[in-house]
Image (cartoon, rainbow, N blue to C red):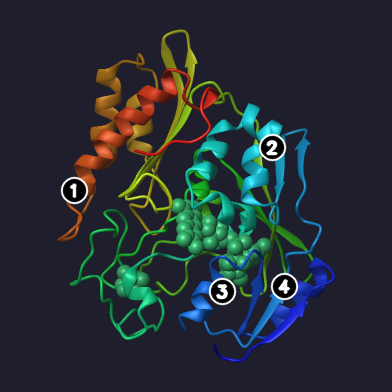
Amino acid sequence: MRPFKYTSAPDAAAAVQAVSANPSAKFLAGGTNLVDLMKEYVERPDEVVDVSRLKLDQIRSTSGGVSIGALAKNSDTANHPQIRKDYPLMSMAIYAGASAQLRNMATNGGNLMQRTRCQYFYDIAMPCNKREPGSGCGALEGINRIHAIFGWSDKCVATYPGDMANALYALDAVVRVRKPDGQERSIPVQEFHRLPGDTPEKDNNLQHGELIVAIDIPKNNFADRSYYLKVRDRASYAFALVAVAAALEMRGNTIERARVVLGSVAHKPWRSAEAEAALVGKPATEATFRAAAEAALAGAKPLEHNKYKVELGKRAVALALQRAMTGGAGTKTGVSE
Ligand SMILES: Cc1cc2nc3c(=O)[nH]c(=O)nc-3n(C[C@H](O)[C@H](O)[C@H](O)COP(=O)(O)OP(=O)(O)OC[C@H]3O[C@@H](n4cnc5c(N)ncnc54)[C@H](O)[C@@H]3O)c2cc1C
Ligand code: SF4
């Protein structure tokens, strides 16, 4: 491992100051992604600033909904009584990720910031525009089975691999960030991650030195009808090939509001306005769900090895909606297919 400086920040202000003063510095939270990447020489910070002891781990009820600390552990978040009761989609999505041991270490801020699982990104012998801008994209003409079918560019076809963020996109969350000048800014989660375009080295719209302090989720009426479906190569401890966060709000037999977010199909969670439009105002029938699934995948542009994701995506959307309608997240704590 390369030598690096380690400091432990006493408070958020000191952490932000330390990282913003050094262009090569990184925050260290649970370390479950950053340390792996450092061991593989993919990330090479010359300083890590440990934020794991900052008092940013509370989960508290607010007048508008719930505020979740950036340093709350994934497992504490998924198990929290208010999250389970009012935002069960969040619990399901978190439980679907990683393993119990990892969820006990992983923080919510780190989870949002986790990097792609593209194999070429991890292999420093291969070209990768995300790791080394300008070096090329190994996956574009290589083995791209796990890669994007939406929103990719000829510079990068990677996906964002996480689960929790798919639920946050469905629930209109807002990410609160502390800036180097000591002020806070709020980023609607839909604007947090980026598409690759010509700058795939940038995963998201955080500026260097900005620290995520909390994630706020507004109140909603989705708790009784939401579902997180994760399809992967094996039943646990694997990243999604396709995931769907689905949520419905009914008025009588008619769908009043709908959320459909696909995971592991793009460089960011992919909220499908087309699927949602196909649902709103319609009865909650299998035919409606199939039409929404067709609409969700209609614009997909698969690569050579991931054409299967289009049909898989359609089936996953239709099934997630059906399960959401029959009580989904209200009765279960996690799911994989
Ligand atoms: C084997 C394995 C399987 C996994 N499977 C899944 C899965 O199925 N689904 C899933 O969603 N995830 C999965 N993960 C990823 C795991 O959830 C993430 O590694 C974890 O959430 C990262 O959180 P952390 O606190 O450990 O972050 P760290 O590793 O400490 O940090 C990750 C990045 O976030 C930055 N960062 C951390 N906190 C902040 C903050 N507050 N503000 C700004 N930047 C910050 C760091 O600088 C770093 O760049 C898996 C990981 C492993 C190792
Ligand atoms: S898809 Fe993106 S992360 Fe993967 S090799 Fe290409 S540039 Fe790198």
Q: Residue at x 34, y 85 (%)?
A: 134
Q: CA distance from mark 1 to mark 2?
A: 36 Å
Q: CA distance from mark 4 to mark 2?
A: 25 Å
Residue tagged by mark 3? 35
Residue tagged by mark 4? 50
Q: Residues within 10 Å of mark 2 (few under 14, many from 20)?
A: some
Q: Nearer the viewer, mark 1 or mark 2?
A: 2
Return the residue found at the far top: 252
Residue tagged by mark 2? 80
Label 2 sits on what residue type?
His
Q: Is residue 198 visible?
A: no
Return the residue found at the far front: 101
Q: Residue at x 36, y 68 (%)?
A: 197
For residue 10, what is the image quadrant?
bottom right
Q: Residues within 10 Å of mark 1 (few under 14, many from 20)?
A: few
Q: Residue at x 74, y 73 (%)?
A: 16
Residue 330 % position (x, y): 54, 23
Residue tagged by mark 1? 308
- Left or right, 235 with reference to 334: left
Q: Nearer the viewer, mark 1 or mark 3?
A: 3
